[in-house]
């Protein structure tokens, strides 16, 4: 169900939205722009609004970015013009309001020590504060993205060593950030002190690769080496890879929603495979919320792994129950009111002969506002199912995210204001089961504290008090 | 695996390719162009090369068609300009050679009795012969598609009743055709005497809908009424729906590949659900080719239903084992030789942690040339699988198709020249099992004779002798 | 003023509109598609709606055509794909109603004797009659252009010699046509028996070139050889150029409007230079309609040559008085009503300091509906001119054209229903002088009979009686 | 000849290139974005590389800019989304190296006192110095345009009054600048202390308009009020128009090349009409360099007004001698070497019948490198002229421009290194006459000191010593 918004069917926007994927490669002698094209192609699920690549060739930095998907933003000629030894890339998701090319990434700036390109995944909670400080010193801003604030800070702090400036900057930043940056001769990767957003390191021979997810390492034929540690900066230059740790203390707190929904099933995050974790979520869900039924099926594609796990644990047969149109994209022309109702199945169509007369369990990864779930339940009933049991492979989303997920304010979170029983009624299911917080952590086989699950439990990894008051404090997520 | 070509990754073209989807609606008072847009969107899997819609408004016929996917071919303004009571639509697949706008459909012609628009799915085996006859009479041709031959024949035969002309034309046509046509005040649907390509009828209130698959009926909120019978013509006009049967005798012979690969799982073809049939193929395959293994997974998406059936019948756990990049489209920029090998996983990536150390069964729907299968087996081994057992939910493809599938000539069909054991060696699997012909028909729960399975058994539904000699006899598939 | 419509400022459409330019080259060893690109670029003033090129390479014929200007229709890749020895090209103007790609030219057809591509400038008056005859024999039509009728006729008549078929076809065609055609190994040029539209022959070394105007010969570095004679067919093949004369008798009747407005000043038509003729029109106009004034200036660009001639003959100083915006194109966004009046000078702006306090003579080539002239006179007065004398370098347009000019029916021709004195009042000028018919012919230094001046005198070169009744008889001009 | 580069025919780049046009409107209740669209359309001759519009609506500022011509950058939807009371617009020319969207204008920034959009025509000679100072304070830069430096300076200096900040900024800027700026509720126009680039003020009822040239006032129906004085700032807000003078002393020094080539003939610059001045240049040229000849004609369009003046003063008949293709644009596909020579006349074609056997005088506005002039002379000779006398309506260009014209360094200026006699030989003319410096000023009827003619006499309006050393000191012209 979480794919709803990604299809551009706006009325459905019923889900948290991930914001951005980053990629970098240090590879003298390799076709680094093409590798980066492949890398961000593999991360396309993390952002479909804009795509960009910056390349350094020892002398200068060149960049191309454009609105749309990776294949829309780049063609052979553009890619051929981006020659160099080092490259970074970015794919972006953002809310409509700021859907402007000026906010696309990477951001390329020039300052007293040369060119610097940045690509950011995450969200600073003190971006506005930092920006106001810089503005008070007479700085101007041309975008609404965190990267511009970060670049300005680095420029302020750089007294000759960009590495020192980056570490200094980290002391000022509050929030989530997985950053890849390049100068004319260095590739730099940084992960915030809590490691809220993922960032991995791989190698292709002598070359180094950084990526938000390991699926992008696979896509370029890179071998996984390690994850960038929370609070760590990795710098790759002519002398190889150097690691430095920020003195800012943090506690490992990977966003649990990466495992629930954002990441691709074939990625490993901090050593754990996403598909496997999701299957365990489903199995645990089956243990927590068993029900007599004839079939189990997922809301494609987001509920797939958990549905397999649920079916296996419950012994109830797994099947496909709804088919997703693989071609619906951003440019779908909304039908007028008369046939809109008719058109709801253009995107997701139940298989009548599979569902008719059956007691069914339908598995999805999460519920945000609940409107999409209600439509799905109705669709399944219309197809003839006699009982519809919805199972959600995560706990109720009750708190807003401040670290890079575009959730609505609390007022829009159906679970923030309604009990599971009320939600069940709202979506029209015969039963509804959410995975418990404890069950979720058990499935991940880790103590709760190693993840950020604030959207479920309200326990943010650090005090975001001063910024939290104002729901609109963010400039823009990256 | 069959999706390979659809992604535009040309080196892989290792599969039969479907050719075209058709849709029609007779709906005074409805937004027929938008309904047709939705209808062909739901049929997009049947052809991604071009899309077109023709609309009749009692006085005249208007048309728009363009290269590319439905959302690329149409925008709100274009759709808004196509106003009328009747519409037909078409999506086309074709080989590169004739990938020209002039060959897009519908075809709109004017002749002595007015305007006629045609959309065709299928392939005439005597198109060239018919065209030569018409050329000998001084006719000119502007395209290489069968529809132009059909339109010329209808124009020749029409002495005042287009219905009589269509029936007369059917006596001359040899081959497969599901046709939808419109004049300024009539919608006509025709299915060849053998019913090789599917065509269904639905209703939305008083309006009638025709579609290649029932998933397109669902997409527009239409209720299924009946399938057009082999050799039947349905005509919808101001007096409702009329049915006439061609005197040409035929035997029901739906293309079995529709069930194996072409149709969407949520469609019903001549009353049978595609997903359910595929699951039965998989279950039968498990009975015919059992093997001890740890997991069963599909080549996404084409092997999905059969893999579920195989897992259920065998008791071996079902899982996802490879993840398909949902964003790879036609415009993928091929990397240069150096990183092409690296880039193979951009499209399909194995989940290492699921496969490592496992004995795996991977299920796909068919093998044509075998090259893609070989890559997949290698990829799975590289991910750490200790045994790779490939199972194919259809028999070996040994004969060319003459009815609308773009298979290579016999020389390219790996199974035409190699035994299953040889194919197993070529693709590098530890074992390979094809579904048997008998098992396939048993799964469909019908005597063999009700389907065309000529690509497997060489028994074409009628004698195509004179045309069969020359592999290049076709003008073009529609 | 005649440029008004060409700018896409629809409200102004106050003028006859030319329809199409044709070009052909037979040049084994040359880059014939690029030469044709240059050739139709030089003819762009004859049509801005669509552009197309067809190329033959001894084996087959390839084509590309698209809506828009030549540089919009072609890029380097498209041009590079059109390889061969022979090429033809076409640029088209047409009324909005049929502004469809399907009507773009060349038209490429295949018939029993192979491929044939045609490009047509002109208008058949019996196209509908011929089409009805063909339809009665069961032929279908996919366009509304004359070329399709011509191609069908040739296909009907070809018994082995395309040349004989073309000559036979000419016996059936009534109207104006300058045609270039190619088969896989021949380039053919034809001019109607009255030579209403121009067509010239040039050479580049051993290669032959055909073009609507000699400016296109210059553009490709070709040397002018001869004009195709009225009723003549030239055929260029491996044995060189062959000339054959149609037995159909005609009298040389080049459209006088080619000299007045359509052709480029640097072209020679049947041996006479356009700029020079226009200057003579202006000089004669000065003799016929002298007036005391301070300055003479043209409506740019169409009145330029005549204004120079008028100034020289009258001894009144020539100047620029209005400046045309060189960048206004088809996509100009019409301002809303509030600022439309304000925006009238975006296209044509008077030079106040030149006009203020002056008695001015403004020269234009023709008046059709009169609305544009009225705006121009007002604009000049607003700029401070104390007297505005309009001089028109052609006689009053009083009769419709049937040979390729898109004039309105008689009702819209201001001079058909008003005396010059009334027109003067309508446009608000202090005086108005039209060139006389006799003066026009004297300027051309030829007896009246050598030109078609039917739009002025109603004397069509042949009896168009049966078709003339119906103003809407034409299918489409080419 | 000066149009050569504008056509995109790179090999010809033989001329100074203007850089940018600016426009602004303060018009509550008016459709300010559409007015600005018209305004920059009228200024399109000042820059064809990119176009942009920023609009303020009391609350915020919105912007759209894109590469290409005005009609390519804007469509109805984009324009409709730019709603507000105040707008500024910009068209840009630039050298290829920095032909990037990031360098398009207006530049929109946000700083501590809100949003500020800037559009600049001119060139700062101390931009790099100012930028280095800002970088030393830790500022970052995202573009290479002067506007970013200006915006940063204003942000530094703004302590609550943007007007004071702008005046303060002017004390730091050295070079030429005609600037229009807007905040959320103010429109500001500024002209450098020497008035090197033009800027005029007009009114439409209560609304105010600023424009680089008066032709843009005409295009929006505005009445001319005054020119912004050198060193003056005009501010328009809810209380009307306010004028403040910068304390920085300057001497009026309008760029004389505006009169020679840049401005449109229908514009008035500081009260003088461009066409009239050019005609006077031509007349003076006739007096200085008489020669016996049969005809006088211009290199279109740049030599037009001067040729008219030359012809009138000399008594030799004026004519058109070469015709320019009005459709050649930026996307012209360069022919390969074989036919490049042939294709030279695609852009500019001599009228043989006018030139053959004649002694001709061809008038152009300037010569920079001389290569285009040589081609033109050759072309005229090839057309049969027996004597070719070239007359240039400006003195030899011998010094580089530092104020906004993209001239080559001195080494490329043919007149910097060759005497007129040598240039005559290089271009192959029978005689060559340049307008003298004294003659030029006499024609303008002003003492020499009121214009900047440094490209001719090397006397820059102020000491540009420190920057002049390095030819590459500029970041970018605007």
Image (cartoon, coloured by chain):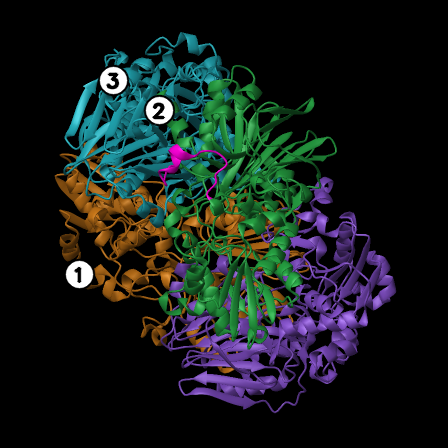
Chain colours: A green, B purple, C orange, D cyan
Q: Is residue A324 visible?
A: no
Query: Which disc, if any, is residue C35?
Result: none
Cα separation between marks 3 and 1: 58 Å
Dot 2: within a 10 Å radius of its alpha carbon, few (fewer than 14), some, or many (20 or more) residues? Answer: many
Magenta segment boundaries in residue numbering: A458-473
Picture residue at 74% right of the left edge, 52% below the top: B355
Same chain for labels 3 and 1? Say yes or no. no
Question: In the rendered view, does C11 fall on the left or right side of A36?
Answer: left
Q: Is residue A352 above or below residue D310?
A: below
Report the label total: 3
SS at mark 3? loop
Q: Give the residue number, with chain letter if any, for mark 1.
A: C418
Dot 3: within a 10 Å radius of its alpha carbon, few (fewer than 14), some, or many (20 or more) residues? Answer: many
Q: Position of residue D451 (x, y in %)?
A: 29, 16
Which residue is outermost to the bottom?
Answer: B247
Q: Quadrant of the N terminus of chain D?
A: top left
Q: Give the residue number, with chain letter if any, for mark 3.
A: D231
Cα separation between marks 1 and 2: 62 Å
Query: Which disc, if any, is residue D151?
Result: 2
Q: Position of residue C319 (x, y in %)?
A: 26, 35
Q: Position of residue D436 (x, y in %)?
A: 34, 15
Q: Is residue B290 visible?
A: yes
Q: Is residue C456 magenta?
A: no
- Predominant SS along the magenta part: loop
Dot 1: within a 10 Å radius of its alpha carbon, few (fewer than 14), some, or many (20 or more) residues? Answer: some
Q: Compare marks 2 and 3 and give the one earlier in the sequence.
A: 2
Q: Nearer the viewer, mark 2 or mark 3?
A: 2
Chain letter behind tag 1: C
Foreground residue among D48 and C191: D48
């Amino acid at each position: 169900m979480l794919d709803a918004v990604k299809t551009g069917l706006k009325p459905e926007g019923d889900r948290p939205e991930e914001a951005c994927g980053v990629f970098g490669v240090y590879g003298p002698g390799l076709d680094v722009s093409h590798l980066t094209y492949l890398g961000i192609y593999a991360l396309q699920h993390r952002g479909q609004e804009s795509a960009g690549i910056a390349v350094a060739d020892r002398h200068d930095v060149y960049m191309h970015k454009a609105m749309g998907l990776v294949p829309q933003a780049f063609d052979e000629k553009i890619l051929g013009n981006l020659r160099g030894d080092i490259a970074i890339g970015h794919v972006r998701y953002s809310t409509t309001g700021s859907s402007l090319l000026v906010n696309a990434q990477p951001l390329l700036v020039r300052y007293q020590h040369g060119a610097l390109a940045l690509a950011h995944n995450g969200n600073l909670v003190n971006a506005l504060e930092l920006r106001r400080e810089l503005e008070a010193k007479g700085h101007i801003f041309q975008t609404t993205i965190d990267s511009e604030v970060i670049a300005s800070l680095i420029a302020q702090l750089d007294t000759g060593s960009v590495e020192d400036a980056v570490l200094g900057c980290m002391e000022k930043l509050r929030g989530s950030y997985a950053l890849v940056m390049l100068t004319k001769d260095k590739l730099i990767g940084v992960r915030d002190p809590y490691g809220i957003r993922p960032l991995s390191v791989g190698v292709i021979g002598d070359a180094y690769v950084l990526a938000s997810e390991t699926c992008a390492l696979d896509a370029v034929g890179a071998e996984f080496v390690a994850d960038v540690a929370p609070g760590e900066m990795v710098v790759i230059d002519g002398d190889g890879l150097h690691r430095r740790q920020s003195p800012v203390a943090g506690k490992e707190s990977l966003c649990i929603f990466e495992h629930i929904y954002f990441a691709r099933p074939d990625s490993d995050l901090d050593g754990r495979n996403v598909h496997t974790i999701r299957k365990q979520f489903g199995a645990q869900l089956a243990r927590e919320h068993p029900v007599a039924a004839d079939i189990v099926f997922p809301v494609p594609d987001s509920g797939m792994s958990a549905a397999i796990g649920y079916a296996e644990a419950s012994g109830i047969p797994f099947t496909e129950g709804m088919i997703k149109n693989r071609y619906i994209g951003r440019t779908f022309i909304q039908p007028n009111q008369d046939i809109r109702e008719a058109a709801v199945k253009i995107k997701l169509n139940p298989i009548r002969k599979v569902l008719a007369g059956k007691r069914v369990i339908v598995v999805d990864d999460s519920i945000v506002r609940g409107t999409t779930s209600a439509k799905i339940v109705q669709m399944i009933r219309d197809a003839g199912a006699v009982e519809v049991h919805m199972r959600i492979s995560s706990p109720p989303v009750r708190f807003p995210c401040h670290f890079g997920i575009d959730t609505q304010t609390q007022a829009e979170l159906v679970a923030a204001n309604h009990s599971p029983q009320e939600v069940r009624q709202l979506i029209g299911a015969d039963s509804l089961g959410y995975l418990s917080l404890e069950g979720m952590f058990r499935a991940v086989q880790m103590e709760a504290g190693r993840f950020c699950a604030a959207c479920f439990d309200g326990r943010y990894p650090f005090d975001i008090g001063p910024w939290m008051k104002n729901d609109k404090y963010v400039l823009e997520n990256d």
